[in-house]
Image (tube, grey):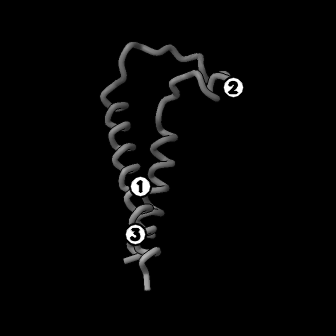
Amino acid sequence: MTLLFTILLIISSALVVLLVLLHKGRGGGLSDMFGGGVSSSLGGSSVAERNLDRLTIGIGVIWFACVIALGLLLAYQN
């Protein structure tokens, strides 16, 4: 069971990193320091951006659940 959660944690970790890197910069952060704040922001976000947000949050919840499950499994392992 521990092996299953470990593999799931590794996969979800890689997916979270990939999905966060796919997000468009919102400005006001490090991207502005290096000239990334040139793009104009329109009032709303696109459907693709909202779906990317939902997918990122979903994978993040899976990652968090794996961390908690692994912690509990390793804490109560005999």
Quadrant in the picture for the C terminus: bottom left
Corner quadrant of residue 27: top right
Corner quadrant of residue 45: top left
**Crowding at mark 3 (Cα within 10 Å: few <14, some 14-19, many 20+):** some
Mark found first going from the N terminus, 1 or 3: 3
Vertical relation: 19 (above or below) 34: below
Give the residue type that dot 1 points to: Phe
Instruction: Name the residue furthest bottom.
Output: 78
Corner quadrant of residue 65: bottom left
Task: Determine whether the residue tagged by mark 3 lies in a helix, strand or loop.
Answer: helix
Task: Determine whether the residue tagged by mark 2 lies in a helix, strand or loop.
Answer: loop
Give the residue type that dot 2 points to: Phe
- The image shows residue 17 at horizontal and vertical percentages of 51, 48
x 61%, y 23%: residue: 36
Circle 2 sits on which residue?
34
Q: Which mark is residue 53?
A: none
Task: Determine whether the residue tagged by mark 1 lies in a helix, strand or loop.
Answer: helix
x 43%, y 57%: residue: 12
Q: Nearer the viewer, residue 75 or 69?
A: 75
Mark found first going from the N terminus, 2 or 1: 2
Q: CA distance from mark 2 to mark 1?
A: 32 Å
Vertical relation: 43 (above or below) 55: above
Q: Are marks 3 and 2 in contact (CB under 8 Å)?
A: no
Would residue 53 be found to the left or right of residue 29 on screen? left
x 41%, y 13%: residue: 42
- The image shows residue 63 at horizontal and vertical percentages of 41, 56
Closer mark to the observer between disc 2 and disc 1: 1
Q: Which mark is residue 64?
A: 1
Circle 3 sits on which residue?
5
Q: CA distance from mark 1 to mark 3?
A: 11 Å
- The image shows residue 38 at horizontal and vertical percentages of 59, 16
Q: CA distance from mark 3 to mark 2?
A: 39 Å
